[in-house]
Image: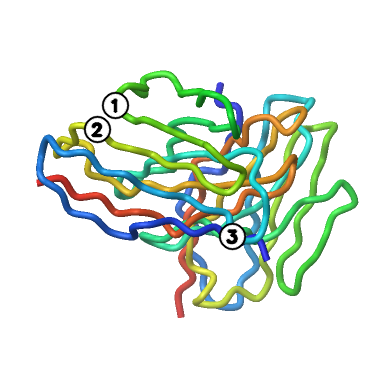
Amino acid sequence: RKEVEQDPGPFNVPEGATVAFNCTYSNSASQSFFWYRQDCRKEPKLLMSVYSSGNEDGRFTAQLNRASQYISLLIRDSKLSDSATYLCVVNGVNAGKSTFGDGTTLTVKP
Amino acid sequence: GAVVSQHPSRVICKSGTSVKIECRSLDFQATTMFWYRQFPKQSLMLMATSNEGSKATYEQGVEKDKFLINHASLTLSTLTVTSAHPEDSSFYICSARTGNSPLHFGNGTRLTVT
C-alpha cells in the first residue's frame, strides 16, 4: 500500500462545477498536510496547507480527518484555469520526509 | 517570501558528460532539500533527501554515485548527474523547507542528453 494515495483521475468537469479530491495517508503520526497544484511541464506550487479545523481560501476548501487519515480538497465554481494536476503532500514525524500522492488531474471544460 | 531558485532551467549535454544543477533558497534557510525527477505524464519521483552538512539519503533504486548531491550550506544544494546518458533525460526539480513548513519548489531543470 502506498504511503499517500489519491483519487485516480482524470476528472473532467464543466465550468462552474464543484469537484472534490480525496487523499489518504497511512502513517497516523504524520504531522502536516498540504495541497499543491502542478501545471504541465512546471514545478508544483503550494495551493494551501490543511488544518485540522478545516480551512478555506476563496473557492478552495481543505479539510483534514485525522481519525480516518484523509485530507480533502473541494473546488467550487470551477474555472478553466483550475485545470491542473493536484497533489497532496504529507510531512512525516519530526519534520521527516515529505511524501506525495501521485496526483489527480483535473480538466475544466467550457 | 519562500523563494527557491533552480539553475539552469534547461540544459542540453552530450552523452558521457556531467551536469550540475543548483538549488538555492533565496530568502530562508533550508534545513532540508529534496531532489525529484519527473518523466512526461508521470508523477514526481523523490530521488534523495539532503540535510545541510550531512550526506544525502537516497531513495531505493537511485544510484548515489551517479547522482551526486551536496548540501554545503543552508541555502544551497547541488545535484550533479555524472556521465549522463540519454535515459537520464528528464525534468529535475528541487524543493526546500525549514522544519515542518510547506515545501517550496525550484522551477525545475529540463535535462536533455544527446
State the image coordinates of residue B69 (x, y, percent, origin top left): 42, 33
Q: Is residue B41 above or below residue A42?
A: above
Residue A46 location, quadrant: bottom right
Pinpoint the chain carrying mark 1: B
Q: From what the image shows, is residue A98 above or below residue A74?
A: above
The type of residue carrying mark 1 is Lys
Do callouts 2 and 1 point to residues on the same chain? yes
Quick check: do tags 1 and 3 share a chain?
yes
* Contact check, label 1 and label 3, Cβ < 8 Å: no
> Which numbered circle lies on residue B39?
none
Secondary structure under the numbered disc 3 in the rendered image = loop
Q: How is the image coloured?
A: rainbow
Q: Nearer the viewer, residue B33 or B86?
A: B33
Q: 10 Å neighbourhood of mark 1: few (<14), some, or many (≥20)? A: some
Quarter of the figure that contains the N terminus of chain B: bottom right
Locate residue A46 relative to residue A72 in the image: left or right: left
**Residue under pointer 1:** B66
Mark 1 and mark 3 lie on one chain; the one further toward the N terminus is 3
Q: Earlier in the sequence, mark 2 or mark 1?
A: 1
Which mark is on residue B82?
2
Q: CA distance from mark 3 to mark 2?
A: 26 Å
Q: Which mark is residue B26?
A: 3
* SS label for mark 2: loop
Q: Residue at x 45, y 74 (%)?
A: A109
What amino acid is found at the position of numbered circle 3 in the picture? Leu
In the drawing, does residue A93 fall left or right of residue A52?
A: left
Q: Position of residue B95 (x, y in %)?
A: 54, 47
- Kind of residue at disc 2: Thr
Q: Quadrant of residue B84?
A: top left
- Front residue of B56 and B61: B56
Q: CA distance from mark 2 to mark 1?
A: 5 Å
